[in-house]
Image (cartoon, rainbow, N blue to C red):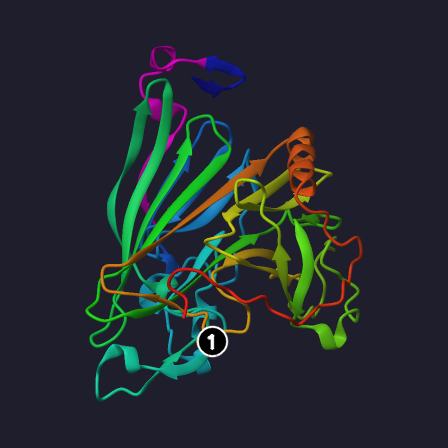
Amino acid sequence: MTELFGQTHDRGQIAALSGHLHQFGGVRLVTLGDGAERGVRMLEFRTGSGLRFTVMVDRAFDIAEVEHQGRAVGWHSPTGFRHPAFFDYEGEDGLGPMRSFSGFLVTCGLDHMLGSDEVSAESYNYPRRDTVRHGLHGRLAGTPARLAGYGERWEGDRCVLWAEGVVEQAPMFGEVLHLHRRIEADLGGNEIRLTDRVVNAGPTEAPHMLMYHVNIGHPVLDEGARYIAPVTKVLWAAHEGHYRDQAIGYRVMRGPQPRFAEQVWEHDMAPDADGEVTVALVNDRLALGIAVVARKEQLPCSYQWQNLQARHYVLGIEPSTHHVLGDTAARDRGEMLWLAPDEGRDYTLRFEVLDTTDAIVGTEARIRAVAVQPDEDYPPPTNTFPPLAGPGRR
């Protein structure tokens, strides 16, 4: 059954209420038409609950806008959703991607994430190349997808809104990695479901790193907004040398700050009995929040990004395959993921909009039942990173 507008309906009842399902919700393909965004294809999802979000077909099938009942949940940077033709991965000493960085979800990978680095290209099996230089967060986010399909599908009395795409990251004599992505939401629902499979389609083994940069803006992010997570300890803080200088810890946010310098944390998170880690940002005043749910075995590391500078104002929740130490360290520690030809890895994420006080209270209770986060704003970082193990790491 489908819950719409405070009532429960079966498929026949919903069909009787309009001339077309799109009166209530659905998926449609649109193309942006002006400025640096011109030509970017978007899939617009509307669930009928007040949840609306857009998927950028031409930017890695990432999620651009998320809003609920007209209230923004996702974040827009000053760059806008620039066409991939303007994506300058090699520019500005590896910081070129910052000129295109925007949206609720920016996927970082597929063979590199975090800061610039230069690493061995031995796995490419190409005598003319000894090393490969990476810029910030990898090449994926600037790569258009091939749209495999989209639409609405009835499963009995449940209607699923869906879209699928394939993003191919490939040079000659290098990594050939394909991201197969499916995004779903239910008619009447407040949840976005993402399923990814990364496959090595090349002739040699390939390194693999992945991070989901989930960016939340105002009004969810606001003075007093709370970060809730099953944090067992803080592993690292980029700003440890001036930990308290900006008077903003990890738990409670403040409004936009002039000349705020970004703060990044890595937390160790505890999974629940189902192996899931739930992290939320909530605004109690508005009874509005967003929860990000990832699987610990797939994404064992978790970052928190605070960029509370005025006119950039954003908080990031970032599940990841690797520690913040980066590409070279992952190789040195035997933690890089290596995919053999035709081998793949699967990832699932859920984004749950919390649109009532009860939903916030229930999510917080669910998280606290797993682990009670440190009850202080500046828990001392351990600077000790638990070894990462499992299939594919060496």
Image quadrant containing the C terminus:
bottom left
> Residue 200 falls in which quadrant of the image?
bottom left
Magenta span of residues: 9-32
Q: Residue at x 51, y 14 (%)?
A: 7
The reply to whether the magenta stretch includes residue 277 is no
Amino acid at dot 1: Leu
Q: What element carries label 1?
A: loop
* Residue 361 located left or right of residue 165: right
Give how far across and how far down residue 148 sits, in percent. 23, 45
**Is 313 above or below relative to 18?**
below
Relative height, residue 105 to residue 156 (above, below)? below
At x 59%, y 51%, the residue is 217
Residue corresponding to mark 1: 95
Q: Is residue 18 visible?
A: yes
State the residue at coordinates (37%, 73%): 88
Give whichever of 359, 73 is nearer the camera. 359
Please indicate, yes or no, whether residue 287 appears anywhere in the rendered image. no
Considering depth in this image, is 90 or 266 the residue closer to the camera? 266
Horizontal and vertical percent position of residue 316: 58, 57
Residue 160, percent from left and from top: 36, 30
Q: How many marks?
A: 1
- The image shows residue 97 at horizontal and vertical percentages of 43, 70
Residue under the image location 70 percent in, 42 percent down: 368
Q: Is residue 18 magenta?
A: yes
Crowding at mark 1 (Cα within 10 Å: few <14, some 14-19, many 20+)? some
Please determine whether, in this image, residue 69 is positioned above or below residue 138: above
